[in-house]
Amino acid sequence: MDQDQPFEEAELLLQPHYLLRIRSESGGASGEVWLRNKEGHGADTHLFNVPRQESAEELKRWAERAVRAYEEG
């Protein structure tokens, strides 16, 4: 990654208990899926990284499929 290129971060709620943290990168986006703490106190739990995708929209679709698979066990 080019250190001179700034990247942006954003958060997107996938479902009531899952959060996608997105990092825009040159030519795409990557991110992480977190399980939100339902109790309202304490830290969220990191579930998995989302591999780099061509766009934030593709990243969101990938993460939604992964969350469904995670829930199905």
Image: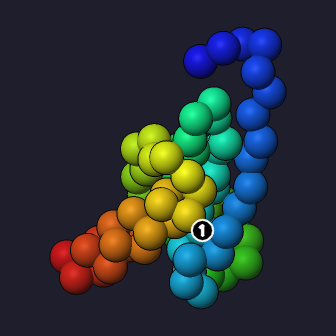
Residue 36 visible in the snapshot: no
Question: Residue 56 location, x and y as percent?
Answer: 59, 56
Which residue occupies the foreground of this view, 40 or 21?
21
Residue reaching furthest bottom? 16
Name the kind of residue labelled 1 in the image.
Answer: Leu
The quarter in which the N terminus is drawn is top right
For residue 68, side relative to residue 34 (left or right): left
Residue reaching furthest top? 3
In the figure, residue 18 lies in which quadrant?
A: bottom right
Residue 29 visible in the snapshot: yes
The residue depicted at 65 percent of the width and 44 percent of the height is 23
The residue depicted at 48 percent of the width and 60 percent of the height is 58
> Does residue 50 sit above or below 8 in this rendering?
below
Which residue occupies the foreground of this view, 26 or 45?
26
For residue 64, side relative to residue 35 (left or right): left
In the figure, residue 2 lies in which quadrant?
A: top right
Which residue occupies the foreground of this view, 2 or 43?
2
Which residue is denoted by mark 1 in the rendering? 19
Colour option used: rainbow
Which residue occupies the foreground of this view, 28 or 14?
28
The quarter in which the C terminus is drawn is bottom left
Q: In this figure, what is the number of numbered marks?
A: 1
Question: Residue 16 location, x and y as percent?
Answer: 59, 86
Question: Residue 13 location, x and y as percent?
Answer: 64, 75
